[in-house]
Image (cartoon, helix red, strand yellow):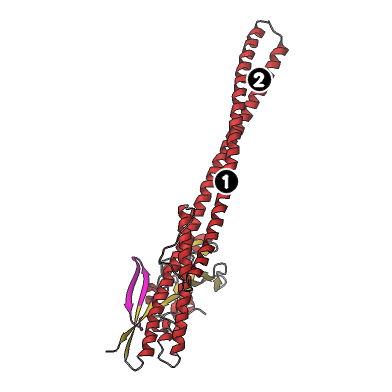
Amino acid sequence: MPDLARTCHVCASGFFRVLIAILIAGTCAGSGAAQDAYRLNTGDRIAFRFVQWDTIELGFVEFDAVNGTYAVESDGTIMFPLIGAVEVEGKSLAEIADAVTLDLQGQLGLVEPPSASLSIVGHRPVYVLGSVATPGAYDFSPGLTVQQALALAGGLETVLDDSPGREAATVRASGVLQEIAIDIARQEVRAARLRAEMDGANDFTIPESVTHPDGPDTLKAVIEHERALFQSRREARTRALDALDDSRALLETEVSTLQEKLAGLTRQVELLSESVGNMEALFERGLVRSPSLVAQQGQLINLENRQLDTETAVFRARQAIAELERERIGLEADRRLDILRELQRSETAIEQLTARRDMNRRLLLGAEALLVASDEALDIRTSYRITRSGPDGPQTRDVTPDTRLGPADVIEVEVIILPGG
């Protein structure tokens, strides 16, 4: 069942409406302030229940067609049967209840709006990053603190654990660094290839700073793999463009031929029109017979029809050329967009891998300090920061382990090891 402490309702006045409010709200007293403070956003899931007192049947009528659980879509709306899309992003449950009940009243032609019970049954997750055992997204629940989120993420990195197994933790951290360095090298080579594709270059080079932990031969193999992919994609693009160019050339040749044909037909139509005009003048004077005039008029009509057909063919060929040009532009635009998306993903991966590498380096140095100077006192400090989106954009601030979190908060945990003083 939905948490009744997170339920709000809207009821109309009158004895039966008060009764409805009591039956629906139950133990809601005291939850209004919290609900007014919470604003919905994409990813929240809300349970809706609508009822109305039937004065004839003397019972409550359930609105089964719209009762149920709904998720806030990416555009900030909830799609209801009968009503359609309702904007809910940034609104409280009470505000949404008011809007939906009024929409139902208008849609169904009710004398009074129904009563509504809304419950939040699912929140956006929180994200735990940094010096934790298992970074990632975790389910949010009201009252969740930074310390509790850290527990969900498995606590701090085990490499900082001053235990008999810390040597093994150091080895694991070294292995993680090795894997990260391999991934960074691959992503750097891939990004260089994508930048060259974006620029339309014939080949690509990588920065001299790129290295591979397994040595230059392994780096060369990675480069050759990306170069083969580069050439394959380049040849595919060239074939596609050449096919469009060949089709365009054929159509342009067809247009040229049709225009020559059209010029000849136009000249014939002009000459025959002049001849028909002369024959009509002679016919009016009784100097030529009617069948001869009719025959020439028929020939003129046939020529004019052929002229019109040729003009239509020219128009269609030119239209096909324009469509080929649009297809070419679309092909290039789609290609550049795909490359840009791949490049953004690769650059994002490089940034994330670099951050992980730096963090693991610090952790490894701390573990080595524990191994070398186990008899010395070390000052291990943990700092916490949360990033929360608001009306003015994301805001980052330092917090304590007891700080309460909100949905979609990003928690960054950092461990710093200093020599003891």
The amino acid pointed to by label 1 is Asp
How many dots with numbers? 2
Which residue is the extreme one toward the right?
A: 291
First reached walking from the N terminus: tag 2 or tag 1: 1
Asked whether 394 falls inside the magenta stretch, the response is yes
Q: Quadrant of residue 372?
A: bottom left
Q: Nearer the viewer, mark 2 or mark 1?
A: 1
Res. 112 visible in picture? no
Measured as percent of width and height from the top left, residue 163 is found at 42, 92
Q: Is residue 33 above or below residue 73?
A: below
The amino acid pointed to by label 2 is Leu
Q: Nearer the viewer, residue 103 or 375?
A: 375
Looking at the rendering, the stretch of residues picked out in magenta corresponds to 385-411
In the displayed structure image, the side of residue 295 where residue 96 appears, left or right? left
Q: Which residue is mark 1?
A: 242
Q: Nearer the viewer, residue 322 or 198?
A: 198
Q: Quadrant of residue 302?
A: top right
Q: Nearer the viewer, residue 54 or 174?
A: 174
Q: Which residue is mark 2?
A: 300
Residue for point 62% across, 10% down? 278
Mark 2 and mark 1 in contact? Answer it, CB < 8 Å: no
